């Protein structure tokens, strides 16, 4: 079994809070993580209809089965349990008593805020990171982008297309109905496809509305559904101390390149070499590696992008306590001066920076023009280098 980086943070949270909640996309490994970390703790899954009915009809009797606490999987299926859990933990006052998991972050977080505010530690778990899967091994970039990082592909040796086909169908046919009243599932599936073709691009709701044939209000509702179920992530713009010429729409990213590849109809990793979206898929992969690093260590996202009306752009900015850290992401395997142009312009238009990064679609570890240059296999190392205040 592959050891998850988030295990360390999970253990720490259980020593500090009576309840720990883990949220993330379906099949990201939440259940495996908590059960392997706490093998002696009672476990119950509310996806089971019989168990869910008992928890719904008799929540007190259900929870009283676990005098030493429990892991409760997919707790958003019975939201009334939150209030009863609050009563129990206030009486017991034991840290790590309940560990809760859920796949719908908006509904989940709403219920947590209502009943368990201040009583729960929160951890977001995304699929595997490159570091967790491969460590020091070098895996061809196209294979990485095509396969993605969902654990079952690796644990169960499931062919990529089989896994993603089942994942999308299950999501469309079941999860979407649980989250919202989407009546035209075929149109919603088209919406997902159109969004997938825009991963790594600035979000244009009007364009989405026109292409799918839905209202602007529906576009926002459906984007919220995708976000709630961890299919997409909106990278917000960085516009501190800048003028009104800054683009203020977020960029849209899917959370997994394997899922995007499937939705786009890519059937083999070889097709990626000359695919027109290879650059956007590479950027998606890198942004998600940064996000996983933050979430696995219990931190919130401090990632942004920059773009102004003159076309000046930085792919990602890490907003640290000691200033912005701009990073450019290029799928190219060749270094040239033009790759540093945006970084130099960013300095001139308002912000000096101590360190910057350039990530390429090759294996490399160097420093040029006051910029750390690294390959896709060392994204986590670059992140730690550039955000460690000892380096500033």
Image (cartoon, rainbow, N blue to C red):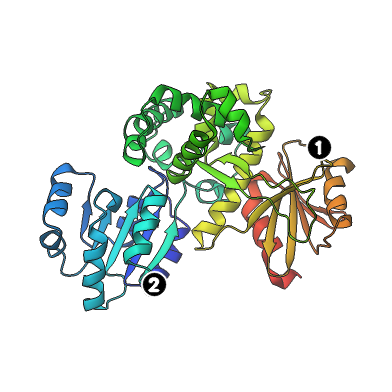
Q: Which residue is mark 1?
A: 334
- Using the image as rendered, state which of residue 31 and residue 209 is in the foreground: 209
Q: Residue at x 82, y 44 (%)?
A: 312
Disc 2 vs disc 1: which is toward the camera? 2
In the picture, measured across the screen, residue 172 lies left or right of residue 82, that is right
In the picture, measured across the screen, residue 297 lies left or right of residue 26, that is right
Classify residue 137 by image quadrant. Answer: top right
- Which label sits on residue 151? none
333 shown above or below 381: above
Q: Which residue is mark 2?
A: 118
Quarter of the image with the C terminus is bottom right
Q: Position of residue 27 (x, y in %)?
A: 38, 42
Please indicate, yes or no, whether residue 136 appears anywhere in the rendered image. Answer: no
Q: Position of residue 378 (x, y in %)?
A: 65, 50
Q: How many labels, in total?
A: 2
- Using the image as rendered, state which of residue 275 and residue 317 is in the foreground: 317
Give the mark nearer the N terminus: 2 vs 1: 2
In the picture, measured across the screen, residue 130 lies left or right of residue 274, that is left
Within 10 angstroms of label 1, few (less than 14), some, or many (20 or more) residues? Answer: few
119 shown above or below 367: below
Classify residue 201 by image quadrant. Answer: top right
Within 10 angstroms of label 2, few (less than 14), some, or many (20 or more) residues? Answer: few
- Using the image as rendered, state which of residue 207 and residue 349 is in the foreground: 207
Secondary element type, mark 1: loop
Q: Position of residue 359 (x, y in %)?
A: 72, 46
Secondary element type, mark 2: loop
For the residues labelled 2 and 1, the Cα–Cα distance comes to 50 Å
300 shown above or below 158: below
Q: Position of residue 153 (x, y in %)?
A: 42, 36
Please indicate, yes or no, whether residue 314 appears anywhere in the rendered image. Answer: yes
Q: Residue at x 43, y 30 (%)?
A: 164
């Amino acid at each position: 079994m592959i050891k998850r980086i988030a295990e360390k943070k999970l253990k720490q949270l259980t020593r500090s809070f009576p309840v720990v909640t883990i949220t993330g996309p379906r099949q990201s490994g939440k259940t495996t993580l908590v059960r392997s970390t706490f093998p002696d703790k009672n476990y119950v899954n509310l996806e089971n209809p019989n168990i869910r009915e008992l928890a719904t009809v008799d929540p007190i009797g259900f929870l009283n089965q676990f005098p030493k606490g429990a892991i409760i999987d997919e707790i958003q299926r019975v939201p009334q349990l939150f209030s009863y859990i609050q009563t129990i933990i206030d009486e017991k006052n034991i840290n790590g008593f309940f560990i809760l998991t859920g796949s719908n972050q908006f509904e989940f977080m709403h219920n947590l805020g209502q009943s368990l505010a201040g009583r729960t530690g929160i951890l977001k778990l995304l699929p595997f990171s490159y570091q967790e899967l491969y460590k020091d091994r070098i895996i061809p970039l196209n294979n990485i982008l095509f396969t993605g990082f969902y654990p079952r592909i690796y644990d169960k040796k499931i062919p990529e297309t089989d896994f993603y086909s089942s994942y999308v169908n299950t999501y469309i046919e079941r999860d979407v109905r649980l989250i919202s009243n989407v009546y035209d599932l075929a149109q919603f599936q088209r919406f997902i496809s159109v969004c997938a073709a825009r991963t790594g691009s600035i979000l244009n709701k009007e364009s989405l509305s026109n292409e799918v044939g839905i209202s602007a209000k529906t576009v926002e509702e459906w984007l919220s559904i995708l976000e709630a179920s961890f299919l997409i992530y909106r990278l917000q713009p960085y516009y501190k101390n800048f003028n009104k010429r800054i683009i203020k729409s977020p960029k849209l990213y899917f959370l997994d390149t394997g899922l995007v590849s499937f939705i786009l109809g890519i059937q083999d990793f070889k097709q990626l070499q000359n695919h027109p979206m290879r650059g956007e898929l590479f950027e998606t992969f890198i942004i998600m590696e940064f996000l996983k690093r933050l979430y696995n260590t219990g931190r919130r996202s401090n990632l942004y992008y920059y773009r102004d009306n003159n076309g000046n752009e930085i792919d990602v900015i890490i907003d640290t306590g000691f200033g912005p850290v701009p990073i450019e992401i290029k799928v190219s395997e060749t270094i040239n001066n033009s790759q540093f142009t945006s970084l130099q312009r960013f300095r001139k238009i308002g912000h000096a920076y101590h360190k910057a990064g350039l990530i390429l679609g090759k294996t490399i570890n160097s420093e040029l023009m006051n910029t750390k240059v690294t390959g896709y296999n060392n994204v986590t190392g670059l992140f730690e280098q550039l955000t460690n205040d000892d380096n500033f």
